[in-house]
Structures are given as C-alpha cells and as structure tokens.
Amino acid sequence: MKVFINPGHDKEHDSGAVNPNSGLRECDVAAEAGALVVDYLEAAGCECRILQSDNLAGESEYSDRQGNTVCGDANDWGADVFVSIHCNAANTAARGTEVECYDADSGNDGAQLAQCIQSQIVDALGTTDRGIKSRPGLLVLRQTDMPAVLVEMAFIDNDEDAALLAGKTDEFARAIARGVTDYEQTL
C-alpha cells in the first residue's frame, strides 16, 4: 500500500497552533510524528512519501512554495491513502483526539480509515474520544483522489494534552501506523 503522510503546517511559514505556556509548536510535533509514522509503516511493508508544506493545493502566497502542492503530489504519486497529521487547539480547556474525513457518515473508505486511526489512538493513549468528524471543506480531504484523513492527535493548547504530545509522540505515531495497517486489512 502506498501511504502519503502530510505533517501539518510548515516550520518556516505557518507553525500552526502553539501552546501558550511551553511554546510547543504544532508543526514540530507533526513533523516528528510524521517521520515516525513513515518508519513504522515502511517496516510494515508500506511504501511511503512524506511532505510538510503550507502549499496544500496551490493557495500559498509564498514564492518559494509554488512548486509541488501537497494534494497534487499525493495525487500524482498515486497514493492509496492520505494521512495529514495535526494538533488541535481551541480554548486551553478542550482535550482529546478526533479524526476528520470528507464524510464521516457515509461508511466510505475515508470514514473507515478515520475510525481505524481514531480507535488506535484512543485505545493506546487513553485520550478523550472526540469521534470522527465530517470536514468536506478541508483542502486535503476534498482535493485528494484517495481516501484521506486529517488526524487531530490532541489539543496542543491544553497543557495536559500538550504533555502527551511532547512526551508520547512515538506512541501517537505507532497508533496512527497501526490504524493505517488495520484499514489495509479491511480492503
């Protein structure tokens, strides 16, 4: 199976959410988790490609980001699944894990992939289960040609969740990889 991994945001242009107390940046957590997911999936026999960029589908304003887009690269490569890795943020009180897909109620492949990853993270890390969410407006979910999900591992602006993100990145990565291989077994 060909798996495209997209660690969310961009280290130079768009750090994503930041913990107000520790300064932990979403782009850094996502990059570390993404690299680990690739390692685990390749060890399981998957072929992987990874790209972290703020240029998702040609909308970037930065002149150095006008080449490959995340969605275009995944489509051109012919990925079987697409996984974008993120950290959520809200109000410093919200906690937990959710996985977003184009249509959570359809039972389609994207919803199945989302449920596999969601279950693995919640079971492995004991995070609050915020469920599978429909987000058809997200570029990475509507501009990709394969089943696609956006994983919100935990809330980076909540100090307890941020401690999990910083201290258990490997566990998050393993859970995401297991979710992908669980999904592969359903095909």
Image (cartoon, rainbow, N blue to C red):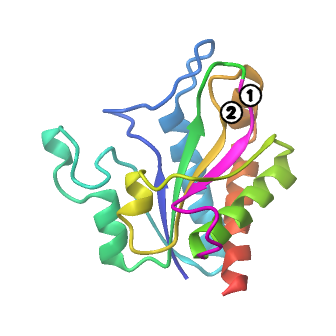
Residue 163 is marked as: 1
Instruction: Give the structural element (helix, strand or loop) at label 2.
Output: helix
Q: Is residue 146 above or below residue 31?
A: below
* Residue visible at 55% across and 50% down in the picture: 85
Q: Main secondary structure of the magenta part?
A: loop
Label 1: few (<14), some (14–19) or many (≥20) C-alpha neighbours in 10 Å: some
* Residue visible at 67% across and 71% down in the picture: 112
* Residue visible at 60% across and 64% down in the picture: 39
Instruction: Give the structural element (helix, strand or loop) at label 1.
Output: helix
Q: Quadrant of the C terminus?
A: bottom right
Label 2: few (<14), some (14–19) or many (≥20) C-alpha neighbours in 10 Å: some
Residue 119 location, x and y as percent?
A: 79, 59
Residue 166 is marked as: 2
Name the residue nearer the viewer: 78 or 132: 132
Q: Residue furthest bottom?
A: 187
Amino acid tagged 1? Ala
Amino acid tagged 2? Ala
On screen, residue 136 versus residue 88, left or right, reads left
Residue 149 location, x and y as percent?
A: 55, 60
The part of the chain drawn in magenta is 94-108
On screen, residue 47 versus residue 142, left or right, reads right
Name the residue nearer the viewer: 57 or 44: 57
Residue 114 location, x and y as percent?
A: 65, 62
Q: Residue furthest front?
A: 105
Q: CA distance from mark 2 to mark 1?
A: 5 Å
Q: Answer yes or no: do the residues labelled 2 and 1 have beta carbons within 8 Å?
A: yes
Q: Is residue 20 magenta?
A: no
Q: How many marks?
A: 2
Q: Is residue 96 magenta?
A: yes
